[in-house]
Amino acid sequence: MRIRQFYYPHSAGKRQLNASIAGGYNTFSKNGTYNASLVYGDRFFNNKLGIILAGAIWDRQWGTDSYDVSYNTGLANPVQQKSINTIMFKRYMGKRQTYGANLGLEYAFNPSHKLFFRGLMDKFNDIRPVYESYIDYTNSRYQYNYRYSHYQTKLNGAEFGGEHQLTQRLKLDWSVSDYISRYFLETPPTNGNKGLPIATFRQKITGGFDNLSGDGKRYWGFDSPDGIGGDPLQFNAGLKNSGEVMDPSKLTLQQLVIAQLDTKEEDKTAQLNLKINATSKIILKFGGKYRHKYRESTFGSNMVYLPGAALGIPNSPALLALNKLNRADFPMGHGFFKEMDGNYNQYIVDPLSKQQLFDLYHADTLRKYGFRDLTSAGNATNYYTGTEDVLAGYAMAEVDLTEKLKLVGGVRNEYTSFTLNGSKATTMGTPATTTITQVTVKNNYNALLPMVHLKYNLNKQINIRAAFTRTFVRANFNDMTPGESVDNTKTPINITKGNPDLKPTFANNFDLMGEYYFSNIGLLSGGVFYKQIQDVIFSDKVFYTEGGNNYVLTQSRNLDNARLYGFEAGINKRFNFLIGFWGGFGVEFNYTWINSEVKIPRMVGSNRVMDKTSLPNQSRNLFNAILFYERNEVMVRLAGNYRGQSVETINQQPGPDFYTWTDKNFTLDASATISITKHLKAFVELNNLTNEPLRTYMGDKRRVTMTEWYGLRGQGGIRWDIIK
């Protein structure tokens, strides 16, 4: 994710130049990090021209251990739907690099008229080697995947505009902008195709397992029909032959894949705002905006090569064993899955070297070892282009009804014209023939969005606010494409399909808030809120078994009406009523409680039932707590962030027992800054002090689907105001 940040010309008439440099360490990857920035600003021509230029670089190592479990949810037997399909030990160990430059210009002709320019260039590299070791209970085998990916994000663009005080009562501002972003794989070409190369090796488990239930399936103990199973985070593969471990001499190359990704998006906008001070108590505002978004994307496109020996073709070259290829050392970092009870070192496999991985895709190598291009004909449906044009206008008024009561009311209207050009695949006949059909998706709609705010000043320290707003969220381009993508490197095989019939989500929002300002700096606030939501967009998963393979199909869908209500409270207070050293302490705290409900229809036999759950990705309990100390040029902060459990994926047809949830999560960070001189400060930042993992589960908290650990990381450095 990239965050767009602008640096504005400063209004002061003096020059500024400051620099920052820092170094750090990641306890997971056991690597160092560094970052640096430089900012220069000044004004020229009698302060008419302001300029600010900023540049930054950030290079950091990172790593993650991810323990993933998939279940046989596609089976017909309801008990066996909770049996285990695969266990995967996945390790990421990579590097992330951020480079950015920003330029801001402002020219003031006089106090009433000025022009501005803002430009930015950002690049983000995410270099991500991945090592995946599977135990596949369904097929009684090991699987090992190695992939080397280099994702890159580029964001370039500029904005030009002006502010004009036309008369004492009339002010005009305007701007035009053009930003282009691109997210793609910068991995070197393989066989003439740029993409993410994935090599899949498999090894048959011949001795079988001794911890299977009576029905021949593997379960966790609490799901097993006869109690035979284990504990997810104290995993034991249950091999009858304990010596039958993953072996590079037995892991043979079964598949080569090139996963392609290339997305380009351009946003062009033009907007104009008019402000009229009609009277001393009435301010009127009007404005309009036009936005044109163009997007072209190749998403989830997989080119697949399979060896003839794996396909059963006579006289094919023998399958390649991993130990016969050039390999690199496995990145151990702080250790392998140290956070779980047990020893999992048997799943550590030295991977292919980076160059060896790329060499496997050369045409001569593919031919030598009998690989055939078995890319699905439906792969062509993974490319689309689309445009989204939005024409918006608004009118609003700020009215002081009395000395204590203020009204802000208005209406915004947005008309959206959406067009997506893609394709879909249709397979028919015997033998099966796939036909690619071009498809154009159109979705034009209007959104009328009224709002009204009331603010009442009970006294100088207490405000009461009430508001009604209508808002909406558009569906994403990827969610509406008619095509689909298939990832057959995963078990179960993952299929992602678009839904051209998606509708935007609308919400009516009601809020009531109170604020109390302490007489000696600080704020106490609280309030209640209620939302009515229409056409909620959610990610649905469907599990099924076909041709001896397990599949999971993910597709975005709309639900009917939902609702949400809750309250929030917060305090920001410095303890300056205490004496001496203790007066430097303070606290910031906010808590939100949210109750949401959405109904999910599904069929049970011939009956239609309605399940209830909370809104996707909406936690019931949220809070942030900060204890700080500020005194004598010293600032220290200890910050905790809590997010309660939330539904991540709604598996509509199987029902609530198969919904995927994100578990509750609490992280703790710390920072400190000390002023050494007037121009020089030293700082330190520490993140994830408790090494809190990210967990997801299916239905029951014990039924783990993923647990990820990231390790503690931190950095320290200096900020130098060279010219201040």
Image (cartoon, rainbow, N blue to C red):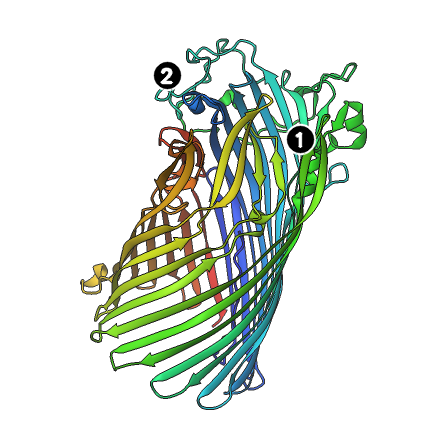
Give the side of residue 11 with respect to residue 155, left or right: left
The residues tagged by marks 1 and 2 sit, at their Cα atoms, a distance apart of 45 Å
Q: Quadrant of residue 215?
A: top left
Q: Quadrant of residue 81?
A: top left
User: In the image, residue 245 lies at what x, y percent?
Assistant: 54, 15
Of badges 1 and 2, nearer the viewer stands 2
Q: Is residue 693 among what the camera can see?
A: no
Residue type at the position of mark 1 = Ser
Q: Which residue is mark 1?
A: 353
- The structure residue drawn at horizontal position 43% and vertical position 66%, both measured from the top left corner, is 449
Give the side of residue 30 with respect to residue 586, left or right: right
Q: Quadrant of residue 411?
A: bottom left
Q: Pick the residue in front: 445 or 9.
A: 445
User: In the image, residue 177 lies at what x, y percent?
Assistant: 60, 69
State which tag comes first along the sequence, 1 or 2: 2
Give the side of residue 383 with respect to residue 247, left or right: right
Q: Residues within 10 Å of mark 2 (few under 14, many from 20)?
A: some
Q: Residues within 10 Å of mark 1 (few under 14, many from 20)?
A: some
Q: Pick the residue in front: 176 or 108.
A: 176
Give the side of residue 220 with respect to residue 434, left or right: left
Residue type at the position of mark 2 = Pro
Q: Which mark is residue 583?
A: none
Q: Is residue 498 among what the camera can see?
A: yes
State whether residue 537 is above or below residue 55.
Answer: above
Q: Which residue is mark 2?
A: 225
Count of numbered circles in the view: 2
User: In the image, residue 541 lies at what x, y percent?
Assistant: 49, 36
- The structure residue drawn at horizontal position 76% and vertical position 36%, both measured from the top left corner, is 191
